Amino acid sequence: MKIRLDRTMCDGFGMCARHAPSHFSLDDWGYASVVGDGTVAESDRDAVMRALLDCPVHAITEIGERGAGAPEPSLSACDDPAADVRSAGG
């Protein structure tokens, strides 16, 4: 897992540093920055995910591969939300 922090979105709530202090640091004004390159060890994943989910302004995002080896689900014709629009408008 790898994370990114958009410092322009951060409002300085500090939730991230509370949940995962080894991955987030706060400056003198309370704004966060990522410690290191954003790589998260499996042992820290739960704490970092809690920080990501608790960020009130959604400044933290997960980047990189999504479940290595897991294929993206494909939409069938019946799962396509636009199918109803196309058939109704025709």
Image: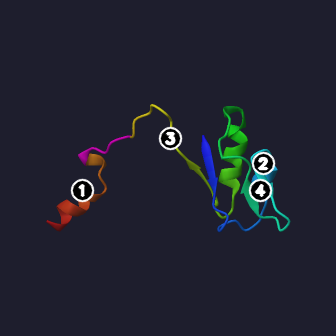
Residue 74: where, in percent of width, then height?
A: 33, 42
Q: Which residue is mark 2?
A: 19
Secondary structure state at the residue bearing disc 3: loop
Question: Front-most of 61 and 28?
Answer: 28
Residue 80: where, in percent of width, then height?
A: 29, 52
Find the magenta span and give its range. 73-77
> Residue furthest toward the right?
28
Q: Are marks 2 and 3 in contact (CB under 8 Å)?
A: no
The vertical placement of 56 against 39, above or below, is below
* Residue density around tag 2, few if under 14, some if 14–19, many if 20 or more, within 10 Å: some
Question: Front-most of 2 and 78?
Answer: 2
Mark found first going from the N terminus, 1 or 3 = 3
Q: Is residue 37 magenta?
A: no
Q: Are marks 1 and 3 in contact (CB under 8 Å)?
A: no
Q: Which mark is residue 65?
A: 3
Residue 1, picture quadrant:
top right
Residue 56, picture quadrant:
bottom right
Q: CA distance from mark 1 to mark 4?
A: 42 Å
Q: Nearer the viewer, mark 4 or mark 3?
A: 3
